[in-house]
Image (cartoon, rainbow, N blue to C red):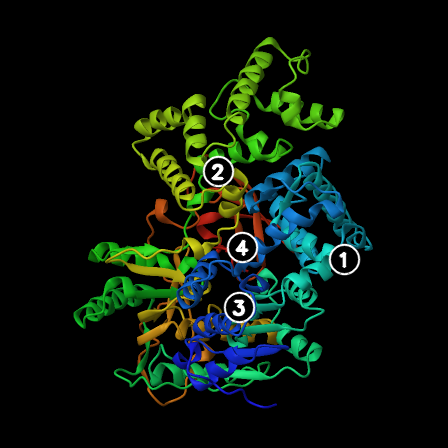
């Protein structure tokens, strides 16, 4: 095809490959953008170029995966064009906007609630309880995960039931009841947001045609993270125009456990054989040595569209691979390396330590504490996952959607007002029996004549408070939240509780939440539904903040999209990276290699990769061997140092733990675990009083149950958010 001419304009700031990608306006286009190659710059300049060439800003849709990325692109486009009306959304926020407008074609109300993972889990538990099913046989989280996998493969409940396996058939029936409960609550979980939008576009030609006219150009960022449903969505949105541009990097596809489909690249080229491929290969982040080592590793993957990254950034230091006797030796060396980086002028907030699983961070954290080195663990309990914040959100969500039974169940007795579990269940059952929204039921003074006088009084008081809040629903959100805190006594409840516990954090979180709402009122001047949508769609990466003068500790998955002056990547050992639970197939092994590559390419100036000859796991040292990926780094610009001797590693040597600090000390029913012989399992019961390692755990493995003393169990905590 003819290459476009590049006038003196917006495109002048781009390199030749970026300009080519930005200036191809019409038809399908694939942009392969390697790490650090200016992907966001290219996408935003492409949008600005289209506007300059006469494409209406409102006719352009760009979708990505985090609000943070969408916000950054929106600001860049605004700076380039002065336009405020370009649609720059996450997939989920676009689908919310779409459903608010189009949901009535499915007979659904547009003022639906959005259930996060915790809300969805609560609903699954209620469905299991209503069906009188054994929670130990049907673990709620396992059921929810299975439902999510069905949804992302577009398997409806009736089709899921078409199986000879009795257990799977029963889970599929739970899936059907769960979906029915979502409809009754006028709610959508995250998967539903995508699926219902896809269903409308696929089944209603007039809606699809209208949106194809409205959106003439669609751009997809981070295409390697899309699943089959998301790809089908953008295909339908561009079915009439064909103007679909996908930008991404197969070498950074690390989310298959979330449903991401690396095969979407091949599918796109099959669907659009005429699509040009533009490769962004000039890296602006890393030194030649770092880039060369990363390229050497990722070139070993078979299933990728080839590209060769290069850079003009000169080398200062080689990539260093260092072996240690054990993980404590490793942790001490990491503390020293951080001090050395700081002596070179590298600020602590630009230094990061990466690991495959959170379990590896403990020796590092202990050593940094001992050495007085400030650090932050990125990816801990998030602000919106805290009890006090979720309680406040439940009040707001029930005011916005009086059919939301999950939110109502959460707030009926919060703060405590004498409405027990039995009364709560009776209220929910009564509403279901009468086919009435619970909000209407609560406002009916004759609805609870069969309840005890105490329960009637408490429910009447609660209903009066809801009436008062409902009358202020159109007020600024910050004012409404203050009203809820004061009238319910919830702020006072946490203030008293905090004074007893000595921790003011929950009470302070309430103040932080009010501040957040007031900022929303000031900047966006939206209504309650818009505020709830914004909060519901925040992602982990949107909440990832660095702290001044503190080193960042995080998993490799969390590191994606970030960059640091200096990176220490620890635990590069066989069974850990690649992880034993993810490398039993070629696809899994190659994803582990991509994860290693992602971690390496976060580093700008300094990269250190470590491994240990022994790791302490649950009180015993066990042998470890270097990751096979270390043999793939190449020899240019890579130095290997250290390594344990056979005499130095006393395999099976007992290591004394402070029991309270042991990872299994807090083990309880529902804790996911892994055993080197029996694989994945879940603790379904704990025998013995209190906490500690001398209790026995009843663990459900795939091949049956075992009773193990925690102290001698060789169990490891399994991280379900990763696997």
Residue 143 seen by the camera? no
Estimate the spatial distance between the alpha carbons at disc 1 and disc 3, rounded to whole Å. 27 Å
Q: CA distance from mark 4 to mark 1?
A: 41 Å
At label 3, counting other C-alpha atoms closer than 10 Å, the crowd grade (few under 14, some 14-19, many 20 or more) is many
The numbered mark, 4 or 1, whose residue comes first in the sequence reads 1
| Residue 146 seen in the current view | yes
Label 1 near label 4: C-beta < 8 Å? no
Front residue of 314/202: it is: 202
Nearer mark to the viewer, of 4 and 2: 2
Tell me which corner region of the image, top left, top right, bottom left or bottom right, holds residue 464: top right
**Residue drawn 65% across the image and 49% down it:** 99
Circle number at residue 390: 2
Judged left or right of residue 353, residue 104 is right
Give the image location of residue 325, x and y in percent: 32, 71
Q: Earlier in the sequence, mark 1 or mark 2?
A: 1
CA neighbours of label 4 inside 10 A, class few (<14), some (14 to 19), many (20+): few
- Please rate how many residues cluster around mark 2, counting C-alpha atoms within 10 Å: few if below 14, some from 14 to 19, many from 20: some
Label 1 vs 3, first from the N-terminus: 1
Please tell me which residue lies in front, 455 or 366: 455
Q: Which residue is mark 1?
A: 206
């Amino acid at each position: 095809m003819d290459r476009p001419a590049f006038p003196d304009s917006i495109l002048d700031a781009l390199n030749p490959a970026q300009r080519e990608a930005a200036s191809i306006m019409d038809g399908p286009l694939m942009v392969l953008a390697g790490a650090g190659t200016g992907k966001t710059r290219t996408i935003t300049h492409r949008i600005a170029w289209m506007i300059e060439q006469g494409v209406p800003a409102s006719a352009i849709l760009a979708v990505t995966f985090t609000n943070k990325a969408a916000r950054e692109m929106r600001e860049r486009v605004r700076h380039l064009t002065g336009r405020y009306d370009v649609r720059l959304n996450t997939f989920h926020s676009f689908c919310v906007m779409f459903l608010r407008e189009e949901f009535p074609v499915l007979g659904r109300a547009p003022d639906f609630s959005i259930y996060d993972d915790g809300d969805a889990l609560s609903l699954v538990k209620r469905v299991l309880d209503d069906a009188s099913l054994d929670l130990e046989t049907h673990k709620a989280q396992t059921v929810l995960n299975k439902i999510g996998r069905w949804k992302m493969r577009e398997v409806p409940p009736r089709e899921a039931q078409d199986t000879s396996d009795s257990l799977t058939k029963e889970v599929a029936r739970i899936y059907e009841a769960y979906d029915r409960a979502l409809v009754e609550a006028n709610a959508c979980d995250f998967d539903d947001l995508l699926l219902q939008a896809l269903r409308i576009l696929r089944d209603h030609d007039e809606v699809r045609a209208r949106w194809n006219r409205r959106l003439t150009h669609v751009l997809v960022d981070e295409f390697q993270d899309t699943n089959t449903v998301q790809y089908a969505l953008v295909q339908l949105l561009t079915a009439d125009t064909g103007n679909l541009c996908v930008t991404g990097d197969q070498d950074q596809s690390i989310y298959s456990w979330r449903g991401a489909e690396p095969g979407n690249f091949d599918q796109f080229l099959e669907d659009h054989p005429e699509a040009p491929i533009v490769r962004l290969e000039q890296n602006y982040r890393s030194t030649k040595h770092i880039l060369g080592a990363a390229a050497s590793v990722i070139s070993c993957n078979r299933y990728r569209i080839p590209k060769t990254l290069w850079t003009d950034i000169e080398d200062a230091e080689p990539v260093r691979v260092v072996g240690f006797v054990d993980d404590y030796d490793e942790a001490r060396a990491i503390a020293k390396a951080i001090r050395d980086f700081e002596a070179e002028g590298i600020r602590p907030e630009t230094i990061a330590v990466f690991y495959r699983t959170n379990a590896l961070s403990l020796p590092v954290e202990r050593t940094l504490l001992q050495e007085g080195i400030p650090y932050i663990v990125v990816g801990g309990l998030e602000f919106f996952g805290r009890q006090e914040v979720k309680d406040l959100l439940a009040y707001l969500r029930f005011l916005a959607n009086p059919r939301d039974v999950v939110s109502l169940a959460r707030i009926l007795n919060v703060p405590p007002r004498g409405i027990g579990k039995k009364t709560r269940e009776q209220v929910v059952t009564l509403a279901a029996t009468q086919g009435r929204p619970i909000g209407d039921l609560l406002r009916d003074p004759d609805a609870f004549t069969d309840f005890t006088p105490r329960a009637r009084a408490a429910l009447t008081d609660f209903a009066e408070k809801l009436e008062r809040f409902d009358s202020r629903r159109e007020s600024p959100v910050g004012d409404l939240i203050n009203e809820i805190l004061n009238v319910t006594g919830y702020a006072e409840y946490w203030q008293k509780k905090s004074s007893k516990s000595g921790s003011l954090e929950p009470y302070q979180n309430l103040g932080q939440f009010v501040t957040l709402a007031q900022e929303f009122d000031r900047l966006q001047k939206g209504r309650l539904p818009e505020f709830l949508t914004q909060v519901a769609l925040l992602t982990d990466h949107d909440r990832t903040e660095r702290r001044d003068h503190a080193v960042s500790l995080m998993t490799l998955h969390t590191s994606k999209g970030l960059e640091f002056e200096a990176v220490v990547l620890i635990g590069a050992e066989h069974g850990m990276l690649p992880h034993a639970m993810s490398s039993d197939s070629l696809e899994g092994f190659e994803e582990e290699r991509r994860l290693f590559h992602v971690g390496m390419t976060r580093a700008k100036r300094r990269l250190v990769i470590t491994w240990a000859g022994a790791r302490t796991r649950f009180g015993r040292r066990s042998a470890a061997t270097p990751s096979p990926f270390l043999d793939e780094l190449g020899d240019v610009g890579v130095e290997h140092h250290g390594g344990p001797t056979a005499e130095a590693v006393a395999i099976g040597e007992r290591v004394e733990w402070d029991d309270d600090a042991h990872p299994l000390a807090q083990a309880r029913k529902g804790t996911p675990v892994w055993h080197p012989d029996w694989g994945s399992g879940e603790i379904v019961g704990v025998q013995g009083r209190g906490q500690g390692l001398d209790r026995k755990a009843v663990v459900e493995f795939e091949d049956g149950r075992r009773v193990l003393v925690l102290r001698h169990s060789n169990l490891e905590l399994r991280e379900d958010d990763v696997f």
